[in-house]
Image (cartoon, rainbow, N blue to C red):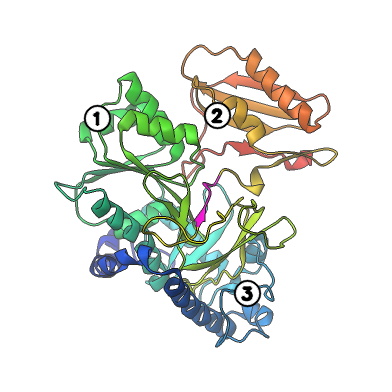
């Protein structure tokens, strides 16, 4: 028995109301990707006003900060009177932010521990608790918010399947991702995966086992992290993997252009990139043939800001993205800070049938920046230029040191390390790092984060700042 919830063994029965509601309602959501933006924003603002009412009435922490906010007139056009909200704010005040007074951070964490051991279940029969991969964030979703979040991903899938003419024959899909239901990607899949011909392969399996499973199953659709799809593309071109998927979805990590090109070349599949998070779920989705992402405009308010919290215009890369999740009332996130660098594309209207504003593909996070003595800042691109473009390197991880970096790489063939070291040292020296020291070594496999299975490519050293 979970902390106040259902047993894991009963989850298949417990999820049926959620699953059946999604199956019954999702078709009506397909057209939302083509709704006029004004209509999407009208729905967003209606949801925003409901969220603010709930937060003022049921959250002591929000009641104080929203005291002067009129819940009947507020819109997403200007939330600047409300202070931003950081993860530190959330975790320090969790018990006062949550809107169900029965739930505490301690209860949520005990529930997560049970889920990790026994499998997915609802907390108090209504709530889902998830965490971000490799972080201390704990997030609570209410039943309706969880369903609305599912609609945002399934409506894109359904629209794309019809658009690409993939409705003929059985839908055989494989998901290669987190193996624990404490992560939102896996929890969403378990809740809303309809009956059908699908397979789940934990990303933590050896690569040879994943290749074998795919060869046996022969999927039409793939869902995996970009780093995994890129590695599978290498296996496909080497002849060890032999599959012919029509559609490949990816997200949770940056999808660099060379990775997209390798995946498309190897499989001949349409590659769809997504931008999502545990705090708000689907934020953006790419249209076939384009690296940019269309924003999901009815479920959140998005505010790109610089490092000091000032708004940045389209065409300028932000340091952070403030997100107000308007569909989840359980743990209101209002102007919540994501440390993603986002660039809204400067255009009067997005081309094609989708109407959400477009952003450039996410390439990095403020959290990925390496700051050296003397306030010398090294962006991940300083390392990617030498590592990410080298076709002999399958995967890599960069850990900041006081004067440079320790780097591990998975090599596909014999790889001289001296030229790579020289490039990285030169890059750091040009940025202003004094006498940089870089160590590069080859490993059998780059370690993935527990739970989420994602690769943390850049690990800043706080002590070096």
The residue sitting at the right extreme is 374
Q: Which residues are magenta?
A: 358-362
Q: Quadrant of the C terminus?
A: top right
Q: Position of residue 278 (x, y in %)?
A: 49, 57
Camera-near label (3 vs 2) is 3
Mark 1–mark 2 CB contact (< 8 Å) = no
| Residue situated in front as seen by the camera: 315 or 369 | 315
Name the residue: 24% across, 65% down.
23
**Secondary structure character of the magenta stretch overall:** loop
Q: Quadrant of residue 269?
A: top left
Q: Is residue 410 magenta?
A: no
Q: Is residue 166 visible?
A: yes
Q: Residue at 63% of width from left, 21% of height from top?
A: 440
Q: Which residue is under mark 2?
A: 388
Give the residue furthest to the front. 348
> Which badge, 1 or 3, is on the more N-terminal residue?
3
Q: Nearer the viewer, residue 13 or 81?
A: 81
**Residue 1, can we see it?**
no
Mark 2 closeness class: few <14, some 14–19, many ≥20 residues within 10 Å: some
Mark 1–mark 3 CB contact (< 8 Å): no
Sequence-wise, which precedes: disc 1 or disc 2? Answer: 1
Numbered-mark total? 3
Residue under label 1: 215
- Between the residue at mark 1 and the residue at mark 2, the CA separation in whole angstroms equals 27 Å
């Amino acid at each position: 028995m979970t902390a106040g919830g259902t047993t894991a063994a009963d989850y298949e029965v417990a999820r049926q109301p959620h699953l059946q509601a999604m199956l019954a309602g999702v078709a009506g959501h397909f057209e939302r990707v083509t709704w006029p933006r004004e209509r999407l924003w009208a729905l967003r603002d209606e949801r925003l006003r409901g969220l603010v009412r709930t937060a003022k009435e049921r959250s002591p922490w929000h009641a104080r900060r929203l005291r002067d906010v009129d819940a009947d007139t507020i819109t997403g056009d200007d939330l600047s009177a409300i202070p931003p909200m950081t993860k530190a704010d959330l975790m320090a005040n969790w018990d006062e932010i949550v809107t169900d007074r029965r739930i505490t951070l301690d209860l949520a964490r005990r529930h997560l521990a049970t889920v990790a051991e026994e499998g997915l279940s609802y907390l108090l029969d209504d709530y889902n608790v998830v965490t971000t991969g490799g972080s201390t964030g704990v997030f609570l979703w209410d039943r309706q918010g969880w369903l609305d979040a599912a609609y945002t991903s399934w409506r894109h899938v359904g629209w794309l399947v019809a658009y690409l003419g993939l409705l003929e024959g059985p839908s055989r899909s494989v998901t290669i991702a987190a193996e624990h239901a404490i992560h939102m990607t896996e929890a969403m899949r378990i809740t809303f995966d309809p009956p059908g011909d699908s397979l789940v392969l934990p990303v933590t399996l050896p690569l040879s086992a994943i290749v074998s499973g795919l060869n046996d199953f022969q999927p039409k659709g793939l869902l995996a992290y970009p780093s995994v799809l890129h590695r599978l593309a290498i296996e496909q071109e080497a002849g060890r993997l032999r599959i012919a998927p029509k559609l490949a979805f990816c997200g949770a990590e940056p999808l660099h252009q060379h990775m997209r090109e390798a995946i498309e070349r190897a499989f001949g599949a349409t590659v769809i990139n997504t931008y999502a998070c545990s705090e708000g779920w689907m934020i953006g989705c790419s249209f076939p043939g384009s690296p940019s992402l269309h924003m999901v405009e009815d479920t959140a308010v998005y505010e790109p800001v610089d490092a000091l919290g000032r708004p940045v215009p389209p065409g300028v890369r932000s340091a952070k993205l403030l997100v107000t999740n308007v569909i989840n009332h359980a743990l209101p996130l209002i102007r919540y800070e994501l440390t993603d660098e986002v660039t809204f594309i400067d255009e009067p209207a997005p081309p094609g049938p989708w109407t959400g504003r477009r952003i450039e593909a996410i390439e990095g996070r403020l959290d990925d920046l390496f700051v050296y003595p003397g306030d010398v800042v090294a962006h991940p691109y300083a390392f990617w230029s030498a590592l990410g473009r080298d076709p002999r390197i399958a995967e890599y991880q960069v850990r900041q040191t006081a004067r440079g970096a320790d780097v591990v790489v998975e090599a596909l063939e014999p790889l001289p390390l001296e030229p790579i070291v020289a490039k990285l040292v030169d890059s750091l020296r040009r940025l202003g790092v004094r006498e940089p020291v870089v160590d590069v070594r080859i490993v059998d496999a780059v370690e993935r984060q527990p739970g989420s299975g994602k690769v943390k490519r850049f690990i800043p050293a706080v002590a070096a700042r």
